[in-house]
Amino acid sequence: MNQKDKFYTLSHTLMLLVASFFWGTTFVAQSLGAEYVGAGTYLALRTYIGIVFLLPFVLYRDREEYKRFAEALSGSVISGKKNNDKQRTHNSEHSLALRKKRRLEIDAFIKGGVLAGLFIFLASFAQQYGIAYTSVAKAGFLTTLYVVFVPVISVAFGRRFDNKLWICIALSVMGMYLLCMKGSFYLEKGDALMVLSALGFSIQILAVSRYSRKIDPVKLTLAQFIVEAFLATIVMFAMEKPDISSVQSALPAILYAGVFSSGIAYTLQSLGQKNLNPAIASIAMCLESVFGTLSGWIVLGQKLSLREAAGCMLMFGAIVLSQFMGNNET
């Protein structure tokens, strides 16, 4: 892997690390929000906040992107009376290229938004619903099992990774277990929902990996939020009875999740995953459980045991090691 590829992998991994930081600190917000509102209400409101947060950026980026594209196409303007026919032909080709680009982008916006939005909704709903029936620590461990599911699903569909990358995945799982699990390990109702959540997030990660190459990643984030908000709103009115007082009590948690987890973190995910090996991406994002634990230690004064510290070190070690594995896949 050359220096340019190394820098690309490192910079995009750092984006995912920042995203995982916001997701990790959102676990506490999710737990607090679950005390006042249902999973559908929480998801709908946080996603609408994410949409409002993203919309100005999407409109600005869209305008600038098409401005640059139009300028590139019109760089060879033909002048002179004798060249009027050539000019009209040039303008027609120019217009056709713009329409073709827009059609391809709309196609990616719809397909990518539906696929990623459906599975981010299913994963987030299972996580938010299940977190009321399990501990935050166990939720953090089980949710981040996508670090295993992503490469396994990828291999099932014919994608191959550097064999050494599996060492990083194993280190991540060991680290997550030491960090999150204490005492005997057994699955209850909430835990099973967290495993389903991990599967959902795995497919969402792979969908983002696929479609972030075809469309502006910020637009892809907006597309999946529109689908998620629509589905969450249906659940909110069909299965729950949200009231103003409950929403007001949960509002600080919803605002934090809406701006930092939805608006910022998922945008960084889409940007960071563009042309990045999805296995490396999943290793970086599973550090959300580390940041969740560290934030509890720093902000809330919770104790960090030697076992938990060892788990953090293993997971950070997996991230560092993955940067030497390369971004190659077949």
Image: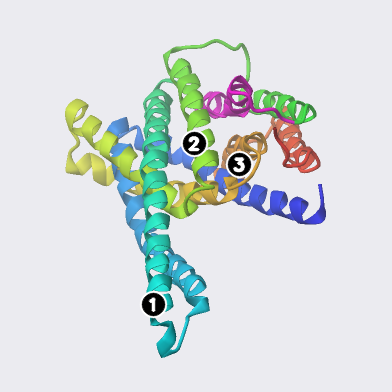
- Does 231 lie within the magenta span? no
* Dot placed on the residue nearer the N-terminal end, 2 or 3: 2
Q: Main secondary structure of the magenta part?
A: helix
Residue 85 got which mark?
A: 1
Which residue is farthest bottom?
80
Say what secondary structure mark 1 lies in: helix
Gap between marks 1 and 2, in whole Å? 45 Å
| 299 on left or right of 52 | right
The reply to whether discs 1 and 2 touch (Cβ–Cβ < 8 Å) is no
Could you tell me which residue is drawn at 46 percent across and 15 percent down? 192
The residue that label 3 is drawn on is: 291
Q: Amino acid at mark 3?
A: Phe
Residue 207 got which mark?
A: 2
- Does 140 lie within the magenta span? yes
Q: Amino acid at mark 1?
A: Asp
Q: Position of residue 162 (x, y in %)?
A: 76, 31
* Dot placed on the residue nearer the N-terminal end, 1 or 2: 1
Q: Position of residue 169 (x, y in %)?
A: 71, 28
Front residue of 219 and 102: 102
- Label 1 neighbourhood size at 10 Å, few (<14), some (14-19), many (20+)? few
Front residue of 257 and 308: 257
- Label 3 neighbourhood size at 10 Å, few (<14), some (14-19), many (20+)? many
